[in-house]
Amino acid sequence: MIKEESNILIEEQGLRDGIQNISTIISTEKKIEYVHSLVDAGIKRIQIASFVHPKLVPQMADAELVCAGVKKEEGVVYSGLVLNERGVDRAVEAGLDHLSCSISASDLHSQKNARKTLAEARKAFIEMVKKCKDNDIVVRGGIQCAFGCRYEGKIDPEHVMNMVKQHLDAGIDELALADSTGMGNPASVEFLMGRVMEEAKGIPVVLHLHNTESKGYANAVTATRVGVRIFDTAFGGLGGCPFIKNATGNIATEDTIKMFEEMGYSTGVDIEKVAQLSWEMQATLGEPLDGKIYKLIEKKQSSRIK
Amino acid sequence: MIKEESNILIEEQGLRDGIQNISTIISTEKKIEYVHSLVDAGIKRIQIASFVHPKLVPQMADAELVCAGVKKEEGVVYSGLVLNERGVDRAVEAGLDHLSCSISASDLHSQKNARKTLAEARKAFIEMVKKCKDNDIVVRGGIQCAFGCRYEGKIDPEHVMNMVKQHLDAGIDELALADSTGMGNPASVEFLMGRVMEEAKGIPVVLHLHNTESKGYANAVTATRVGVRIFDTAFGGLGGCPFIKNATGNIATEDTIKMFEEMGYSTGVDIEKVAQLSWEMQATLGEPLDGKIYKLIEKKQSSRIK
């Protein structure tokens, strides 16, 4: 996937992690337009839906419709998030061939969010991966709260490394570590990701970062030092909101790309085009997003998003 | 000043850089209370005023009154910013013994902001430093826009290094590089600050960072890799505003400290106390500040700021 070490691959998560907790429901048509526009801007990987219970995450209730409406481009990966076997079934039915299966590193978080102990979640994860493989799905195996949990605090890196080994044993094609709470810091990211990169033995490793505590971009840069080259981001820094306490925005696509390109990395993504989508989303939500770079780029009069 | 490499010294700039462009005038009494409260929180260095023309920066018109009202604590450095000889005279009269003399690395920025070419600014700088030394003032010599200028774009590191040498030749006691525009990136910061640290030969070096492009904290962490241990910050990330285009907030005191302390550095500053001041300033300004950490810390009912 990564041809050279100087390339950085961005997985756009704005239309999944970015909007899943936002009360303003984005129409299916708009979501599809956003996906098309992001791909037009050069995004090569994009998470377009999650297959969770619509009552729990109303924003994702139209997952199948989004998948059906997106015109897939050659060379672009369209992925979905699944948290149980029922989700895998739905995603397969919806025609996706790249899925993120994810469980939490925090027992308390797992019990509260997924109503499963870590042991139960592990068992379910192995079944999810098996079902994916049976359906020729590329599986990204994720670990949520890998750097900290709001309920449990710091998470022991040894515990995370055990999960990494179990994930790899389960037969995943890619590994993703998520700092879901933004509690990671450059030292903990360098320590853990260094060990993860070694353990992964060439299997692609993704880092999913939030800027909740202002450390997101520092963590991203630090991760490149130990070889990480794939990052989840959300256009405009969607997912955070300056008016909601503890709102946890993803690192912004534009801000991440600008920083990395200035440092000499290539991403192939057109920031100006992405910024127009962030302006559009700001207008839809009626408040500024967390990202800074789009605000430095002039908003164009006409938008390609209806 | 720095006893061990694991100590980081914070120079609080919220009451100077943080508020100088804000239209809401903070009362002299409030400014003094903020200074006392910040020192109570463990801040050991604080810029409390700038001696510029009151018509150009109305917020700083009470510089002398603030200096007269602040009760100075042993072991704390109270500094002021001066941009010309008249400023030095005023600051000396006001009883300060630590001054920041600063000029721009960008010719166009210097002409627009200080109405001086670089050559004229250099000449004035040497005179300012001389006047400071004659008055037993500790001089911090600063270079604004060291990593980029909104008018000129990128600034040549060779040019900055020449200025660094000239600053050192002028007899400054400390050197400060400012990324006034937030245009620096971890690669350019590492490159330039590495050279600066070498050239400074033990003279304290300060890095002044803005988070305009989301790179502020990444730049701070990267600078520690080449030995920088003194950082300018502003409580709450004052200086930026989510509603004003191109607003350039300083990196936030709380966010910077939390990141560094998690990484194993010591700052001696109580984040909880600083956060209460950010809450107070948010109430005064009527809008959220740019920093994220204070928003994660509960606002206490009573405040020590009147």
Image (cartoon, coloured by chain):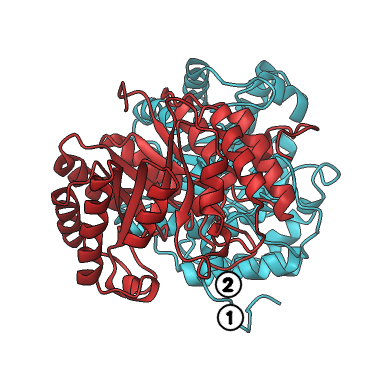
Chain colours: A red, B cyan
Which residue was labeled with disc 1?
B300
Residue drawn 55% across the image and 47% down it: A66
Which residue was labeled with disc 2?
B276
Q: CA–CA distance between discs 2 and 1?
A: 7 Å
Look at the image and tell me whether residue A84 can be seen.
no
Residue drawn 23% across the image and 71% down it: A120
Residue A208 percent across, percent down from the top left = 39, 48
Front position in the image: A39 or B116: A39
Type of the residue with mark 1 = Lys
Left-right relation of B174 to B127: left
Instruction: Give the answer, above or below, for where B94 lies relative to B141.
Output: below
Left-right relation of B44 to A144: right
> Secondary structure under badge 1?
loop
Circles 2 and 1: CB distance less than 8 Å? Answer: yes
Residue A266 lies in what quarter of the image?
top left
- The chain letter for the residue carrying disc 2 is B
